[in-house]
Amino acid sequence: PVRAFSATSALNIAVKNVTVVGAGLMGSGIAQVSAAANLNVNLVDTNQKALEKAKKNIEQSIARVAKKKHADDQGAQKKLVDSVLSKVNITTNLRDAVKDSDLIVEAIVENIDVKQKLFAEIEDAASSKALLATNTSSLRLCDIGANLKHKERFGGLHFFNPVPVMKLLEVVRFDPTSDETFESLVQYGKSVGKVTVACKDTPGFIVNRLLVPYSFEAFRLAERGDASMKDIDTAMKLGAGYPMGPFELGDYVGLDTLKFIMDGWSKAHPNDPLFKPCESLDKLVNEGKLGRKSGEGFFKYN
Ligand code: CAA
Ligand code: NAD
């Protein structure tokens, strides 16, 4: 069984300064919720344009939150937006950013070699006490962290898209993760307003392990012509209470992301029927139809 959290708060490392590496969809959201919790945030990316776009996205997203929180008070809305933006420092200089951080959260491209290389650089530049975490969707912590010198400081913080809205955070530990690291990651999660659940280093953790095979089963149902994509979406929304049906959600998450996750798992577990790739999805991705972000996936978007 997954080890339960201990009640001793003395084990926790207090997080005040956070660096988020990767300023895409997820990294910008993680930076936003951290800044909204009054933490000092460095948001790092190799691409300056991605950093500028992330800052714009954070501004728009926090404006939505502020509008809801202070419906009749434009002054208070502006104050919240300004205070969150002022807490997010964007930079391309990784070494400088991580030097004084208590926690470094990696949210870069889902590629094992790139992630391993990044963590080597982070470990070299960060304080020996800093906590290190990955937001990977599908890779194993034991692979990403294979070359770390201090594996006890490493764990998983798996956020969900859109980060400012989704309340869940999966906190993941692999064998070497220390209790102190794990509990500090849990405390950080709570401090940014998330409900945390614990999971071991198993493919897809909890949510993706269930959600991704379910989505692929839906894609196959439509592939066989048993029901239309629209009807499957309607069925799962109205019959199972999901906010989005599997096709809508696939387009929202990104079809390339889904394909990448499943390809990795099916390579590692070729005989597991839960991890079977799907022809119709492969075809769409090969045609560059990646979902909302490319304007077309299962459905068309303007
Ligand atoms: N920032 C801030 N607020 C946002 C937001 C954002 N980016 N997006 C939506 N919101 C807020 C809106 O302001 C709105 O608030 P109110 O209802 O209080 O006005 C609320 O969220 C709902 O938004 P909308 O009315 O625009 O649209 P909606 O009701 O269709 O909700 C949704 C949008 C929250 C995305 C909802 O459809 C949903 O929950 N979808 C499922 C998402 C999901 O399953 N995510 C997990 C994907 S899997 C994953 O992330 C893991 C992985 O590793 C791949
Ligand atoms: P994204 O493509 O939107 O953003 C990735 C960013 O990382 C890009 O801006 C890129 O320039 C930057 N980057 C790449 N290599 C870098 C490096 N070496 N140093 C610094 N920056 C670098 O990706 P995303 O959807 O935000 O996903 C990020 C991570 O989060 C992935 O591991 C993914 O599996 C995971 N995740 C994604 C979702 C989702 O729904 N998209 C949900 C949960 C977790």
Image (tube, helix red, strand yellow):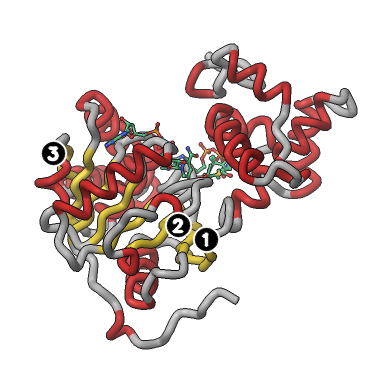
Nearer the viewer's eye, disc 3 or disc 2? 2
- Cβ of mark 1 under 8 Å from ligand 2: the answer is no
Q: Quadrant of residue 216?
A: top right
Task: Return the residue at label 2.
Answer: 142
Q: Is residue 302 left or right of residue 268?
A: left
In the depicted structure, whether residue 207 falls above or below residue 155: above
Q: Earlier in the sequence, mark 2 or mark 1?
A: 2
Task: Return the residue at label 3.
Answer: 93
In this view, the residue in front, 270 or 274, is: 270
**Mark 1 and 3 residues: CB-CB less than 8 Å, in contact?**
no
Helix, strand or loop at mark 1: loop
- Residue type (three-letter) at the residue carrying disc 2: Cys
Helix, strand or loop at mark 3: loop
Q: Earlier in the sequence, mark 1 or mark 3?
A: 3
- Residue type (three-letter) at the residue carrying disc 1: Asp
Q: Is residue 265 visible?
A: yes
Residue name at image x 45 percent, y 80 percent: 5
Residue 193, image x, y percentages: 39, 62
Residue 33, image x, y percentages: 33, 52
Q: Quadrant of residue 250?
A: top right
Give me the disc on residue 201: 1
Q: Is residue 290 left or right of residue 192?
A: right
At label 2, counting other C-alpha atoms closer than 10 Å, the crowd grade (few under 14, some 14-19, many 20 or more) is some
Q: Is residue 214 visible?
A: no
